[in-house]
């Protein structure tokens, strides 16, 4: 393509009208190949040159963006003269030469980005942009509170000051136990070589496992080891926004970018019997505070659906547990809400079907299934500022959640709601049928041997039968904001 005036290129790309584009150029907001051009006679070749406005590429369609779950033993480089595998060798994108954004050392695994967008690479890797990253780290010996506080204050190693933004205890990956002082969730915004390993060595600890689970607003999620996926336009935009936002702005606007130095208490636990108002409250809090929502009941419904498809009865606990831990069930975050996949199939919208509704309590009562899903739920909560909804969140899954809410209402009120919900989900249910359904669910949930429905210790109890939706939501918001002060 021929060389053209910058204002014409911007106008053709839909960035602005020619007159507005001229104002952008004169204001010094437009750059070509990294060099600011502020004269109206400036020209560029849109086929060859990288043209940016305020640091963001104008011709975004030429760029590709890939998230990879890097395994250990793979180099964060484009090639290796010793023939070792590289992150580039694991990703094939036709017509694009990708490069890794930043590095993960050879012994580490986790989220790494690859792109041919030089502007985003510079934004994400330059220290002045202070993009946060989060890591799950296993160490050889427990690290006490004083040691964790020391990492947050900062330590010196080989003349460099190394500092974590936060260090939290978490449960071991795949475990249903309590937080373990040998498992840490470390957040930092630096990018020094082997920074976490070095700072932990200063406090006398050796890293056993290190997995990066977040870069800015982008979480590793359920991406399997060695797998990759292309980012959505919304995710790319969020990365640009995160990289440009100054640190002090990050602390004050977390509803716009959940997961980055999140200033509200998290994770949040919401429990209660069927049709007590949990979903209504959860979505309101997601909208208000920017949490990522996981309705854990959907995971049990997905196991029930998978078991029904496999003709595995609920009394075959071993077969059902194998379905739960097989890796078939996955979570994918979309619009701040976790959707449920079985393999590559998004089954979220199928999980309210009557056959699943009638079977889920039996499958959810299987202890082995609950143990497996609880471990997955805890890992989800550790990876992002989350709000989990279910019947054992505050009592089992997140016993130490900073805010635990327990919703209740009379059986009659909940039966009426369940009938209304059934109509919304495309099925008909009489008042008597809804009442029997609610009563049966209550009995199964409260008497099962594994994680029965109980009021969690320290929970804020809200009777949603006596409050309208606005009052219920206001009470929960008040509880969260009290813990923020």
Image (cartoon, rainbow, N blue to C red):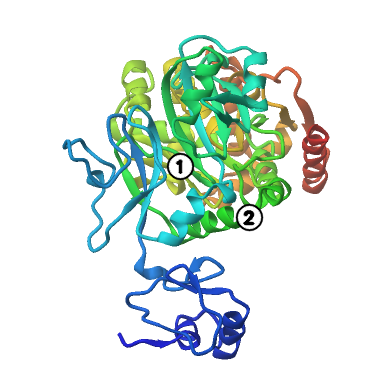
Q: Report the residue at 46% width, 58% height from top.
A: 120
CB atoms of marks 1 and 2 within 8 Å: no
Identify the residue at the far left of this view. 83
Q: Quadrant of the N terminus?
A: bottom left
Secondary element at image label 2: loop
Left or right position of 95 against 231: left
User: Where is 107 relative to 478, above or below?
Assistant: above
Q: Nearer the viewer, residue 474 or 133?
A: 133
Q: Nearer the viewer, residue 255 or 59?
A: 59
User: Where is residue 174 drawn, in percent x and y?
Assistant: 43, 21
User: Where is 209 relative to 309, above or below?
Assistant: above
Which residue has dot 1 on it? 351
User: Where is residue 286 drawn, in percent x and y?
Assistant: 65, 46
User: Where is 92 relative to 74, above or below?
Assistant: below
Q: Report the residue at 83% width, 44% height from top.
A: 471
Can residue 439 be spotted in the picture? no
Which residue has dot 2 on it? 245
Q: Report the residue at 80% width, 38% height from top.
A: 481
User: Where is residue 460 drawn, in percent x and y?
Assistant: 78, 27
Q: Tag 2 or tag 1, which sits nearer the N-term?
A: 2
Secondary element at image label 1: loop
Q: Nearer the viewer, residue 341 or 214?
A: 214
């Amino acid at each position: 393509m021929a060389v053209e005036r910058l204002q014409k290129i911007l106008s053709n790309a839909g960035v602005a009208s020619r007159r507005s584009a001229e104002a952008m150029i004169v204001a010094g907001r437009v750059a070509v190949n990294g060099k600011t051009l502020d004269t109206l006679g400036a020209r560029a070749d849109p086929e060859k040159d990288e043209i940016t406005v305020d640091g963001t590429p104008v011709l975004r369609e030429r760029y590709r963006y890939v998230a990879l779950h890097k395994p250990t033993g793979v180099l964060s480089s484009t090639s290796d003269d010793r023939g070792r595998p590289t992150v580039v060798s694991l990703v094939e994108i036709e017509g694009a030469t990708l490069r890794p954004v930043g590095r993960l050392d050879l012994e580490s695994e986790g989220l790494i980005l690859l792109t041919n967008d030089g502007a985003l690479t510079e934004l994400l890797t330059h220290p002045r942009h202070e993009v946060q990253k989060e890591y799950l780290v296993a160490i050889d010996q427990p690290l006490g509170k004083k040691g964790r506080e020391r990492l947050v204050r900062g330590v010196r190693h080989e003349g460099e000051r190394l500092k974590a933004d936060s260090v939290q205890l978490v449960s071991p990956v795949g475990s249903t136990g309590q937080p373990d002082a040998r498992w840490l969730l470390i957040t930092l915004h630096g990018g020094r070589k082997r920074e976490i390993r070095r700072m932990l060595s200063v406090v006398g600890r050796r890293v056993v496992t290190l997995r990066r689970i977040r870069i800015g607003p982008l979480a590793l999620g359920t991406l399997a080891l060695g797998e990759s996926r292309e980012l959505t336009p919304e995710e790319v935009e969020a990365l640009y926004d995160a990289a440009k936002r100054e640190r002090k702005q990050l602390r004050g606007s977390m509803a716009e970018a959940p997961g980055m130095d999140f200033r509200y208490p998290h994770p949040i636990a919401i429990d209660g019997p069927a049709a007590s108002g949990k979903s209504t409250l959860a979505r309101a809090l997601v909208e208000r505070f920017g949490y990522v929502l996981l309705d854990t009941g959907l995971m049990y419904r997905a196991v029930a659906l998978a078991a029904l498809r496999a003709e595995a009865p609920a009394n075959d606990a071993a077969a059902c547990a194998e379905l739960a831990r097989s890796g078939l069930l996955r979570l994918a975050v979309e619009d701040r809400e976790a959707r449920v996949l079985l393999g590559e199939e998004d089954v979220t919208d199928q999980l309210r079907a009557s056959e699943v509704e009638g079977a889920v309590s039996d499958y959810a009562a299987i202890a082995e299934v609950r143990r497996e899903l609880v471990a997955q739920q805890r890992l989800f909560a550790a990876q992002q500022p989350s709000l989990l909804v279910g019947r054992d969140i505050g009592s089992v899954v997140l016993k130490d959640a900073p805010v635990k809410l327990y919703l209740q209402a009379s059986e009659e009120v909940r039966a009426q709601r369940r009938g209304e919900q059934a109509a919304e989900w495309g099925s008909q249910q009489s008042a008597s049928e809804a009442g029997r359904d609610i009563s049966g669910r209550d009995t199964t949930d409260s008497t099962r041997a594994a994680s029965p429905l109980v009021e969690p210790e320290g929970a804020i109890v809200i009777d949603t039968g006596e409050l309208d939706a606005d009052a219920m939501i206001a009470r929960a918001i008040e509880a969260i904001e009290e813990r923020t002060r």
